Every structure is written in C-alpha cells, then in structure tokens.
Amino acid sequence: MSQPAPRKERRSWRRRLRDFVVFQVLHADDPPHRLALGVALAMFVTFTPTVGIQMLLVVCFAWLFGANKAVGLPIVWISNPATMLPIFYGCYWLGRCALGGEPVDAAWWEALRHPPVGFGAAMGFYWAQFWHIAGPLWLGSLIVATGLAVPTYYAVYFAVCRYRMQKWGALTRPTAAARTRHSKSRIRSSLAAAQHDAA
C-alpha cells in the first residue's frame, strides 16, 4: 500500500525537472549563449567550497559576465548537506594528489567530532581546521569546477540551439504574431500534403 506514494513523488520530481528545463531554459527569452553561460557559471560555483554564499555568487557572476541569472540558481543545490562530504572530499583528494604531501590524519577527523563549547570558540576551531585542508581543497575544487563548467556550457548551448531550431526555426523565441504565422504555414503545408496524397 505504501508503493504508490514513492512512484507519485518520483513522477512529480521528474515533472518539475522537465518543466524547469522546458520553460526556464529552452523557452526562456534569452539567446542560447546567455542561458548556457548561466548554467556553466552555476556549475562552476557549485563545486567550489563556498557553501552558504553560492547562490549570491551565481547571481554576481551572471551579472558580471552577462549571463542569465535565473537558470543557474537550482544548479547550486547539487552541493547540499547530503552531498557536500563526497563532493569536497573528492576535490580535496584531487588537490592533494596535485600538490603532494600527506593527507590529514585520523586525529584531524577525531578533533572535528569534539569542537570546543561556545559559538565563538567553535567557529574559531573550525576555521583553524579548515586551513589545514584549504590549499588542496581549493585547487581540487577549481580543477573539478572548470572541468565540469566548460563542457556544460557547450552541452547546454548546442542543446538549446538544436531544440529551438527544430521547434521554432530560430534561435530566439518568436513573437506571438510570428508564432501564429508559423502555425498557419504548417497547417497549410499539412493540408497541401494531404491533398497531394489524396490526388
């Protein structure tokens, strides 16, 4: 009896994702370059250790580089409390391999489990612990972020171009009058083809 609920949740999640892609990306009133750049910048920010200010950074970078500000915001949700550890540990590992040196030991991990009491003391403790891993973490994050952002730009750009050329015959959304003319033209073509087949 509990089986239909998860299936319904999955369906609604897929529908929301599809609606976002179709209406916020493919049908947005922006050229493909601005949309692709907005998604790529968000992908870059997602894999940097800037959790807490990632959405602000996406908006700032989008404004700075002239990208679409809205399409990238949901991308930063990839790095959330459930995914931060695997994402940033992988980035740290890659950066440490590039820089060399020894990884943090078990004592470092154990110390994280027992921070000092008090907000100020705890924040100072975590800040000091972060600096032990900051170099490799940032280097690895920048490598991963760049390695994902560049192909993301081209994938989104060509996907938007292909979809729009097939759907509208143009790279930008046509006006209402142009859409009406296009629909009438398609109807006339279909009628002419049907008459030709009938003859």
Image: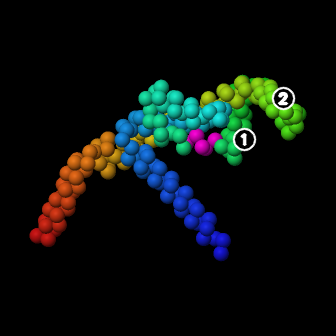
Say whether disc 2 or disc 1 marks the residue closer to the N-terminus. 1
For the C terminus, give its image quadrant: bottom left
Residue 196 at x, y percent in the picture: 13, 65
Number of the label disc, if any, that sits on residue 121: 2
Residue 5 at x, y percent in the picture: 61, 68
> Is residue 31 shown to the viewer in this render?
yes
Residue 178 at x, y percent in the picture: 22, 47
Question: Height in image: 100 above or below 16?
Answer: above
> Is residue 152 shown to the viewer in this render?
no
127 lies left or right of 154:
right
Number of marks in the rendered image: 2
Residue of label 1: 85
Q: Which residues are magenta?
A: 75-79
Question: Height in image: 23 above or below 73?
Answer: below
Please give the name of the residue rendered at 55% of the width and 37% of the height, measured from the top-left corner.
43
Number of the label disc, if any, that sits on residue 169: none
Give the quarter of the image for residue 13. Answer: bottom right
Q: Nearer the viewer, residue 188 or 53?
A: 53
Residue 195 at x, y percent in the picture: 13, 67
For the N terminus, give its image quadrant: bottom right
Is the residue marked by circle 2 packed among few (<14), some (14-19), or many (20+) residues within 10 Å?
few
Labels 2, 1: front one: 2
Please give the name of the residue rendered at 43% of the width and 45% of the height, measured from the top-left corner.
25
Question: Height in image: 177 above or below 44?
Answer: below
Q: Residue flagged by tag 2: what amino acid is it?
A: Ala
Distance from the alpha carbon under mark 2 to that under mark 1:
23 Å
* Element at label 1: helix
Question: Height in image: 177 above or below 147?
Answer: below
